[in-house]
Amino acid sequence: MIRTLILLQFVALPWLVFGEHRIIGGNTRSIKVVPWFGSLLAKSKLKCSGVLVKSNYFLTAAKCVAGYKLSDLKVRLGTSSCQSGGFKVGVCKVKIHPQYSAWRFDNNLALLRTCESLATTRQIKAIERADKVPQDHSRANLTGCGARRGSWYDIAEGRTFDEFLDALNDMFLDLPTQLHSTELRILNQNQCASDWRSFGSYRLKGISHLTICTKTSRKGACVYDMGAPLVVDNKLVGILSTSGCSFKPDVYSNVIKHKTWFDDNTKE
Ligand SMILES: *[C@@H]1O[C@H](CO)[C@@H](O)[C@H](O)[C@H]1NC(C)=O
């Protein structure tokens, strides 16, 4: 409890001071434009974003599912709302990338087999993967339900303080009710690693050819966007691994580099 209060002070004060920095760009988006988008619910609460990659497979970040039982998880598809509507489907199997490690940016991927196969509709449709890694400076769209809020939260996003996070969310987060998309620019990987290093990050492992980064320009991902799809011309290129909350570059697992794992695990 004491620890929570101390952390709250640390988070809440800068938040009030830097209130103007909260909104991280982006426009509301109809699900019909992004019918592959879905949310992951854990114990009935919005946990992460993700993307339908086959009629019975949903791709999200491994970190979003680690520690949960199958019965805790559901996928919500087919709604432009972040809080309600659409179609909820249970998860019958979780396949976490074998090289996933909570301390790395790369390989933060999990394939979730849904208990039912989803028929394609105007609101629900699997996405294809891109086959070429996008070039530095090119554009890509990020879609998510995440809180479009500022950087300080991310610092305190104590990856081990899950309970603290929940309490904080309830107190401070005014989650968007509508799905958002933001157009971002791909950032060179070396630059990305050096930007993260300049913040003295304790989690620097794994910015490599297995990741993609996008630039910070007061736009980008924030809490709850983990697992959010990065898409170029309606094809999937990345899954958000770590958000920079417009403060540091966002880092994604590069799905183009995981073709074998992906193909091997989406057969059933
Ligand atoms: C991003 O989304 C907008 C709106 O749907 C679209 O016009 C644009 O072409 C997309 N950009 C990329 C790189 O896919």
Image (cartoon, helix red, strand yellow):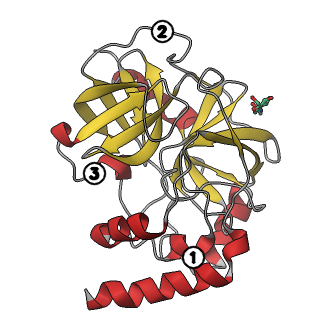
Tag 3 secondary structure: loop
Up/down of 65 relative to 198, above or below: above
Tag 2 secondary structure: loop
Write the residue at 55% across / 31% down. 80
Identify the mark at residue 267; answer none if there is no mark.
none
- Using the numbered discs, state the Cα–Cα distance from disc 2 to disc 1 in whole angstroms: 40 Å
Which of marks 3 and 2 precedes in the sequence? 3
Residue on which disc 2 sits: 120
The residue lying furthest to the right in this view is 137
Quarter of the picture containing the C terminus is top left
Tell me which amino acid carries mark 2: Thr
Between label 3 and label 1, give the one nearer the viewer. Answer: 1
Query: For mark 1, does the 10 Å Cα neighbourhood hold few (<14), some (14 to 19), or many (20 or more) residues?
Result: some
Residue on which disc 3 sits: 66
Horizontally, residue 96 falls left or right of residue 83, namely left
Horizontally, residue 91 falls left or right of residue 249, namely left
Q: Is residue 99 visible?
A: no
Residue on which disc 1 sits: 152
> Are circles 2 and 3 on residues that touch, CB within 8 Å?
no
Tag 1 secondary structure: helix
Whether ligand 1 has any atom under 8 Å from the Cβ at mark 2 is answered as no
Which of marks 1 and 2 precedes in the sequence? 2
Q: Is residue 197 visible?
A: yes
- Using the numbered discs, state the Cα–Cα distance from disc 2 to disc 3 in whole angstroms: 29 Å
Q: Residue 59: x, y in percent?
A: 42, 33
Tell me which amino acid carries mark 1: Trp
Up/down of 129 relative to 26, above or below: above
